[in-house]
Amino acid sequence: MTARLADTISGLFLIVLALVTGRPRSSCRPPSRKSSRGPSFMPTLLSIALAICGAGIVVQARSLPPTNRMPGWFEADRAGAVRIAVVAGATAAYNFLLEPLGYLIVTFIFLIFMLFYLKVSWFLNLIISLVATVSTYALFVIWLKVVLPMGLLEFYF
C-alpha cells in the first residue's frame, strides 16, 4: 500500500466520522435566546473539527508521490498486530461490560488488565488503577454531575 493511498483513506474515514458525529445534532433542541450554544453545539463543533482534519489529511496526501510505499507494510510486525488486537479487544469488552457491571468495577478491571499487559509491577498497577478509577469517578459524578452506569453497585451508591 502506498503512503498516499493510506493517508487518503484515513482522511476520508475522518470525514465520514464527521458526518456520523454531526448527524445526532438534528435531534437536539435548538439553543435558547439567551445562549447561542445548546445541546447541538458540541456535536457540531466536533464534526466540523473532524471534517477539517480529514480534509487536511486528504489534501496533504495528494502531495505525496504516488509510488511511495509505506515502510514495513508488507513485513508487518506480528507482535504489533497482537498488541493492537489485545487493546481493541479489551476496549470492546470495556464498552460491552460497562452497563451491566458498572463504571467502577469495569474501569478498575480494565486498568488492571492494561497495566498488567504493559508489564507494570503489581503494586504500582493496583495503586494507579485505584487512584485513576476513584478520581475519574469523582471528577465525572461528583464535580461534573454526569450519570455513570453503576451496574452491580447501583444499590450502594
Image: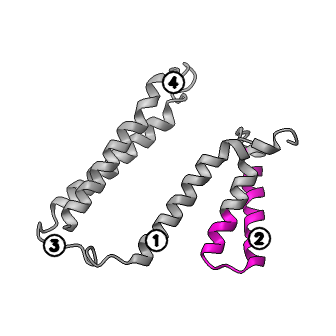
- The CA span between labels 3 and 1 is 27 Å
Is residue 145 rendered to the left or right of residue 74?
right
Q: Position of residue 91 (x, y in %)?
A: 56, 56
Give the residue at mark 2.
Answer: 126
Quarter holding the C terminus is top right
Residue 11 x/y as whole percent? 29, 53
Task: Give, as a three-letter code, the residue at label 1.
Answer: Val
- Tell me the SS state at disc 2: helix
Helix, strand or loop at mark 1: helix
The kind of residue tagged 3 is: Asn
* Magenta extent: 111-140
Q: Is residue 104 visible?
A: yes
Against 123, residue 29 (above or below) is above
Residue at horizontal 12 percent and vertical 69 percent from the top: 65
The number of numbered discs placed on residues in the rendered structure image is: 4
Q: Quarter of the image for the N terminus: give it.
A: bottom left
